[in-house]
Image (cartoon, rainbow, N blue to C red):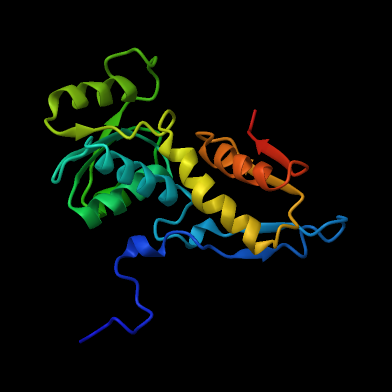
Amino acid sequence: MDLSDLHVAKTVLDLVGQTPLVHLSRVGADLSCPVLVKLETTNPGGSIKDRAAIAMIDAAERDGLLEPGGTIIEPTSGNTGVGLAIVAAQRGYQCVFVMTDKVSEEKVSLLRAYGSEVVVCPVAVPPDDPQSYYSTAERLMRETPGAFQPNQYHNPANPQAHYETTGPEVWEQTKGRITHFVAGAGTGGTISGVGRYLKEQRTDITIVVADPE
């Protein structure tokens, strides 16, 4: 059947982004300005990390760092792993995620359901210990032919994804009337990418990073 004239995504990756804004009318009832949230949970992987996952793999493919059939290795305990697993499943890559034993069994099961391998390491060891999840990921990189590590904390494609997608979406959805943007710290990708884009549109927009003690 010809699907060219139907509103059908070619792959699940085409559904990442263009997430809706919702007005928190009850939470912000006593405030002088409306509070809006961007529902990144509507991305296929359930979080904003899908954006960075696609961007990092796109950049690796473009730069020749990830060959067809290669292996993605990443130490992660969060949603980045889910995003990477979805991209890998769609594009035919192997995935190995290294995480600590504090990660929920549900998260491990989800990653394995996408076809990824999960290596669990003890959390109560220093980062330079051979058993730590950082050291284990480095060892696997050395031992695995054709391996690529996205390295989300240091990969410029992470904030660039938000500069190119999340930031413009926020600006367009608010018709440029946004006054403050708030995001969690995490890897710094969202806050820096969106913040840079918004500041280029209007310098008086306040950028706030939220991080637990």
Q: Nearer the viewer, residue 210 or 163?
A: 163
Question: For the view shown, which residue lies furthest in the bottom direction?
Answer: 1
Q: Please indicate whether residue 31 sits to the left or right of residue 5 in the image.
A: right
Q: Is residue 179 above or below residue 149?
A: below
Q: Is residue 8 visible?
A: yes
Q: Is residue 107 visible?
A: no
Residue 167 x/y as whole percent: 58, 50
For the C terminus, which image quadrant?
Answer: top right
Q: Please indicate whether residue 123 sits to the left or right of residue 176 in the image.
A: left
Q: Please indicate whether residue 66 sits to the left or right of residue 5 in the image.
A: left
Q: Residue at x 27, y 37 (%)?
A: 63
Q: Is residue 173 above or below residue 76?
A: below
Residue 68 x/y as whole percent: 14, 46
Q: Nearer the viewer, residue 27 or 71?
A: 71
Q: Nearer the viewer, residue 112 or 158?
A: 158
Q: Residue at x 54, y 52 (%)?
A: 166
Q: Residue at x 43, y 34 (%)?
A: 156
Q: Residue at x 19, y 47 (%)?
A: 93
The quarter holding residue 65 reads top left
The quarter holding residue 177 reads bottom right
Residue 12 x/y as whole percent: 33, 64
Q: How many numbered markers are drawn?
A: 0
Residue 1 x/y as whole percent: 20, 87
The quarter holding residue 72 reads top left
Q: Please indicate whether residue 84 sits to the left or right of residue 207 in the image.
A: left
Q: Is residue 50 above or below residue 4?
A: above
